[in-house]
Image (cartoon, rainbow, N blue to C red):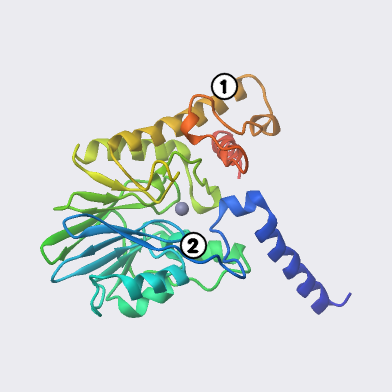
Amino acid sequence: MNRRDFLVTGTAAVSWGCLAGGKVFGQVAAPTPATPPPLRVQFTPLRRGVGIFTARGGTIGWLANADALVVVDTQFADAATRFLQEWPEREGRLIDAVINTHHHGDHTGGNATMRPFARQLVAHEAVPALQLAAAARNPNAPAPTVAEALFAESWKMDAGDETVSARYFGPAHTGGDIVVHCERANVVHLGDLVFNRTYPVTDRAGGCRVRSWIQVLETIATTYSADTLFVLGHGKPAFGVTGTTADVLVMRDFLTAVVEQVEADLRDGKSKAEIVTRQNFDQFPDFRVEQNSRLPINLGVVYDELTNAT
Ligand SMILES: [Zn+2]
């Protein structure tokens, strides 16, 4: 085998591994299948000009009023195209800001599609490097389109008769998760800080730190008001992708249970291989799945965090 043949073969093997390997698949944004299934798109108004769009990938949030348009997250290129074409309130206008809640491909994969129709692309300052690093680990990934309007702690803009603000509370689901607040509507997009009754993606290479994530959720639960409506990146269909502080606290309780389980297993002298065998937690029946559980990955990431593994 000459060098060129080796490279071609090696790339093909890596490609197939990314598509076929369940654990790899669960850790990073899903690669676009060769023939994606038909999209089922849905625009759902929430309140005061704020709504959500669901098709494929992390929930898109939108704000539309007489003077401004704002979009939170971009799913994938095909979904973003449908969003731009079918958003009733857009009426051909430029979008004042497209905001990425974090770097994962199912939230940023439509950036290139939306960028020509947006005045600015906003994200936490850690996000571009995380996008580029994730792309470098996945040879199938297209070159990412990264935000240029970056911030470290907080960001705010006037958007017609609405104020849109964003805050960074620390490492959590990734190293660059922000929370986006439409203040007068009092709707907060949490990105992937809450998976609503599904085992979360825990991407240690992307900066996930579970103990800090628990603290971030504690802060969110006390920062916003009882009337706040939260938009959630993903959710089991029966529970949906909007919620309240109670749903934020379920996520906190789940992550706390994962940490406590691994701590107990470490005290019992269990190995990582023994720790990552659980498929479900009996105390969280709403999360239960019969196959492709991400709980073993969650346990493994917490093991690595508690033992300072790479
Ligand atoms: Zn994510």
Residue labelled with disc 2? 105
Give SS at disc 1. Answer: helix
Where residue 208 appears, as percent x and y from the top left, is 48, 46
Q: Using the rendered view, name the quadrant where residue 102 is placed.
A: bottom left
On screen, residue 279 above or below 80: above
Amino acid marked by disc 1 = Ala
On screen, residue 78 above or below 25: below
Residue labelled with disc 1? 264
Q: Residue at x 57, y 28 (%)?
A: 262
In which quadrant is the N terminus drawn?
A: bottom right
Counting other residues with Cα less than 10 Å from the Cα at mark 2, is it few (<14), some (14-19), or many (20 or more)?
A: many
Where residue 20 appears, as percent x and y from the top left, is 69, 57
The answer to which of marks 1 and 2 sits earlier in the sequence is 2
Counting other residues with Cα less than 10 Å from the Cα at mark 1, is it few (<14), some (14-19), or many (20 or more)?
A: few
Where residue 85 appears, as percent x and y from the top left, is 34, 76
Q: Using the rendered view, name the quadrant where residue 53 is placed.
A: bottom left
